[in-house]
Image: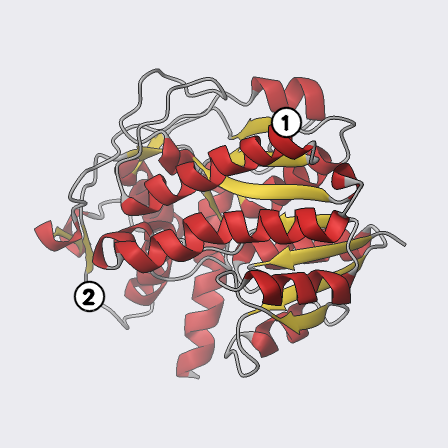
Amino acid sequence: MPRALITGITGQDGLYLAELLVAKGYDVFGMIRGQNNPKMDLVRNAVPEVELIAGDLSDVSGLTRVLRAAEPDEVYNLGAISYVAYSWENASLTTDITGKGVLHMLEATRLYAGDEPASVKFYQASSSEMFGKVQEVPQSESTLLWPRSPYGVAKVFGHYMTINYRESYGMHASSGILFNHESPRRGPEFVTRKVTQAVARIKLGLQSELVLGNLDAKRDWGFAGDYVDAMWRMLQQPEADDYVIATGETHSIRELLDVAFETVGIVDWAPYVRQDPRFMRPAEVDLLIGDPSKAKAVLGWKPQVAFSELIQMMVENDLDEQSALVR
């Protein structure tokens, strides 16, 4: 049976990827930070087949021990501080984990692989936030990167370091430049889940308003369950490469609000939504839309869940969750 190691397994991508790999017959190992991590039970309940190993992206020697314990054929590096707004509050920690953590994982994997650097396939979770102040629309693998947040800068470092290890050491190291991908497992600090959770609470009479920042920002939103399939497909290729994973469609926050409120039967959401400058980014990324044609042509990948289906799925999940809390 093939063996896989996933860092960042407690996040939405880690859980969906673990489920996918288990279904494909993999032995799956998940790296988790700290023996008493509060999300440990989340993983055990969602994917009980996964074996958890303690490790930290800031500790190269510890990562080497994790690799020796897991003996993976594939490494999926999803671990990061991934909340963009937080990266302005703590740019240093974001850089250490989201940026240098990639270097540490690459180096540990290289050392573990020894004389056969391509024997362990490596996936790096890059991000559309690297495009930042976009230089062309849509964005492809060759678009100039111009990050607009400390998080985006850290992701650019990890992205280019992955390319460098591929070219310098012959590692089978690929990056997925994933555009925004959401699910019912998304944390409530992210705008999509913040909206769907608030809409459910407003419908149930548990909340009176939703406070947001820029309603005109546009994103390319897809379903996280679709995107982890693309990750796996990258590591099945004979040659490593970088791929944009996106829907090729863009939607504004206003459109997100339209679909979310319509799901609960509210047509005019204006009375429930208030803008607050505190939620505006210091440097906004106004329009992100990916060109996934390379992933479609080479990987045979395409998204399965449409934007409206995704938001409806999330609202319905939050209605169930919030209803259960008040019973």
Horizontal and vertical percent for residue 21?
Answer: 76, 52
Q: Residue drawn 21% across and 40% down?
A: 215
| Residue sitting farthest toward the left | 277
Left or right of residue 169: residue 287: left
Q: Secondary structure at mark 1?
A: loop
Q: Kindly identify which numbered label has been placed on residue 148.
A: none
1 vs 2, front mark = 1
Judged left or right of residue 68, residue 207 is: left
Which secondary structure, mark 2?
Answer: loop
User: Would residue 178 be visible to someone looking at this image?
Assistant: no
Q: Position of residue 286 (x, y in %)?
A: 25, 31
- For this rendering, which residue is in front, 61 or 131? 61
Q: Identify the colour scheme used.
A: secondary structure
Q: Nearer the viewer, residue 289 or 266?
A: 289
Local crowd size for mark 2, using a 10 Å CA cut-off: few (<14), some (14–19), many (≥20): some
Disc 2: which residue: 208
The answer to whether residue 123 is above or below residue 196 is above
At horizontal 46% and vertical 57% (from top left) the residue drawn is: 186
Q: Which mark sits nearer the N-terminus, 1 or 2?
A: 2
In the rendered image, residue 112, in percent from the top left (x then y), is placed at 73, 53
Kind of residue at disc 1: Asp
Mark 1 crowdedness (10 Å alpha carbons): few <14, some 14-19, many ≥20? some
Measured as percent of width and height from the top left, residue 58 is found at: 48, 62
Residue 150 higher or lower than 289, as above or below: below
Q: Nearer the viewer, residue 229 or 1?
A: 1
Quadrant of the frame with the N terminus: bottom right
Q: Is 81 rendered above or below residue 143?
A: below
For disc 1, the marked residue is: 241
Alpha-carbon distance for marks 1 and 2?
Answer: 48 Å
Q: Residue furthest right?
A: 1
